[in-house]
Amino acid sequence: MAEETQKSAAEAPAAAAAEVVAVSDVPEAEKPTAAIAEKDATPEPVKEPVTAEEEKITESASFKEETNVAGELPDPQKKALDELKQLVQEALNKHEFTAPPPPPPAKEEEKPVEAAPAAAEESTPAAATVTEEESKPEVPPAEEPKAEEPAKPEPEAAPVAEPSEPVVVAEVIEKVEVVDEDGAKTVEAIEETIVAVAAPAEPTPSEEAPPAAPKEEPEAAPSEPPSPPEEVSIWGIPLLADERSDVVLLKFLRARDFKVKEALAMLKSVVAWRKEFGIEALLEEDLGSEQEKVVFMNGVGKEGHPVCYNAYGEFQNKELYANTFADEEKRTKFLRWRIQFLEKSIRKLDFSPDGICTIVQVNDLKNSPGPFKTELRQATNKALQLLQDNYPEFVAKQVFINVPWWYLAFYRMINPFFTQRTKSKFVFAGASKSAETLFKYIAPELVPVQYGGLSREGEQEFSTADPATEETIKPATKHTVEFPISEACQLVWEARVGGWDVTYGAEFVPTAEDGYTVIVQKSRKIGPAEEPVISNNFKIGEPGKVVLTFDNQSSKKKKLLYRSTTKPSDCA
């Protein structure tokens, strides 16, 4: 992980694009396995089967992701999923997701070590007492010749002390040893002391001890019934509750190359972080709307993936930059806002096996703050680490547009550290190719107007359901577009040429031979700085056609977008 963070951190400061990468790395938790040199060294043999699948991904023009349907998974992946589900169930049963991490194992090892010397110390004094007692009997042997010896064996009837034997357990050791070594006299003397000590001890444990034992036995029975498994949800999906949980677990498995134990560890870590960060409460916080122009969702891609745009050039606004990164408190607020935005976006995804649960990221590097913006770099690194560690496999495609030359040079340096799977998600385009590149993955009518598309706020004539047509205008040629009309109506159209710098005009040509051509829009040259989208309408009372003319006198080909609709109700 150390190398991983170094790679990602280096990626962030390289440009304001770093902030972009922070967002892009969110779902690519496989990047830890890709950007780390460690995994490039040893795991190469392990990754061989994965590279085969990765090659399929790169070959797919539509960048289709792996299936999330358990029954369609390859056998090794299916086995890994089953193993992970079993481990998750065991963890839920043991409440391992909510229980604090147990550090007792280390303490337990220390305790026995401390107990051992203690026992040794206790044994030494015991041995000392025995030796002392053994030494004392050595004096009595001188008294053995006395005639009192035959008289005292009779007190042996004093075995009345026998019932005390089970009571005095600790003393038995000393007595036995003394008895073995000494004569009858010593035994008698010891027995007398035993009787004296045992007499008071006998009444208490005599008959009360046995009944107490059965009373203690039921204590094993009071063992409380096992508590039900804990319930854990992530991104609004309860673990192991239904098939949506499989989709979530597959994200963690793919982020860890289907290494089950590592995937489980990552899952536990994410659950713990979400609790610590207070994600559920964060969703309800009001963190303002200052960043809505910086990061925003707009439309879906051609494969149905929601599209997230990251326009960090907005931070060229000094006031916005200061309000976002001036101090630690503001940087923390921005980080929380970014996490909140991502969480809300994820909650709208479809986690069913056949659903769409990933996002297309579009990262605009135009006018991004340079790599020397310390405050931005600090916020970037924090965001990068959090998103990378806690949001695995949420990106379907990473599209970088308006990429400066130095960023491409930087990417070439770090490119060897990425896996083929990760690299297959990256797409880079300079300013002149940005719109064309976006159109490969997102329909033009859904691309925001500032990125070369037709989508803009407040439009009423067209909706996202009205598709746009793409055509290419060759250099030094005139290109025409015709809208045939068969009945009286009102025709509405809009058109856009990438970069413009062409001459545009429109006219209506009636079908009748004796009809007159009507100039709808007088030809005029439209420069790059003028309105990005031209909208017109024309009321038609007879059959005919509206002809749009685009005269490209430049030496470069141009990308043309247009669409039209009719409104019979508005006709004269």
Image: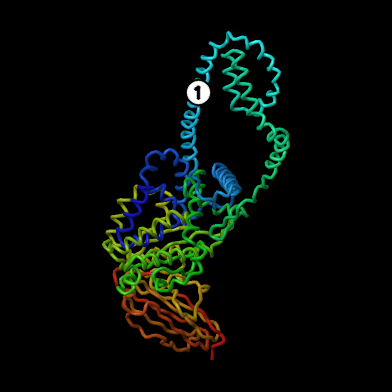
Q: In which quarter of the image is residue 473?
A: bottom left
Q: Which amino acid does label 1 sit on?
A: Ala
Residue drawn at point x = 29 percent, y = 72 percent: 554
Please state the horizontal and vertical placement of residue 382, each as a whole percent of the image. 37, 58
Residue 59: tell me if it is visible: yes
* Element under disc 1: helix
Please state the horizontal and vertical placement of residue 209, each as a whole percent of the image. 70, 35
Residue at the front extreme of this rendering: 147
Residue 2, compared with residue 487, is above or below; it is above
Residue 432: tell me if it is visible: no
Q: Nearer the viewer, residue 300 or 117?
A: 117
Residue position for label 1:
127
Residue 165, compared with residue 228, is above or below; it is above
Q: Nearer the viewer, residue 344 or 112?
A: 112
Residue 30, compared with residue 24, is above or below; it is above
Instruction: Report the colour scheme.
Output: rainbow
Please state the horizontal and vertical placement of residue 259, each as a whole percent of the image. 49, 43
Q: In which quarter of the image is residue 213?
A: top right
The quadrant the C terminus occupies is bottom right
Please state the horizontal and vertical placement of residue 270, each as a whole percent of the image. 49, 54
Q: Residues within 10 Å of mark 1 (few under 14, many from 20)?
A: few
Q: Nearer the viewer, residue 56 or 108?
A: 108
User: How many labels, in total?
Assistant: 1
Q: Nearer the viewer, residue 258 or 279?
A: 279
Residue 361, compared with residue 571, is above or below; it is above
Residue at the top extreme of this rendering: 145
551 vs 349, left or right, is left
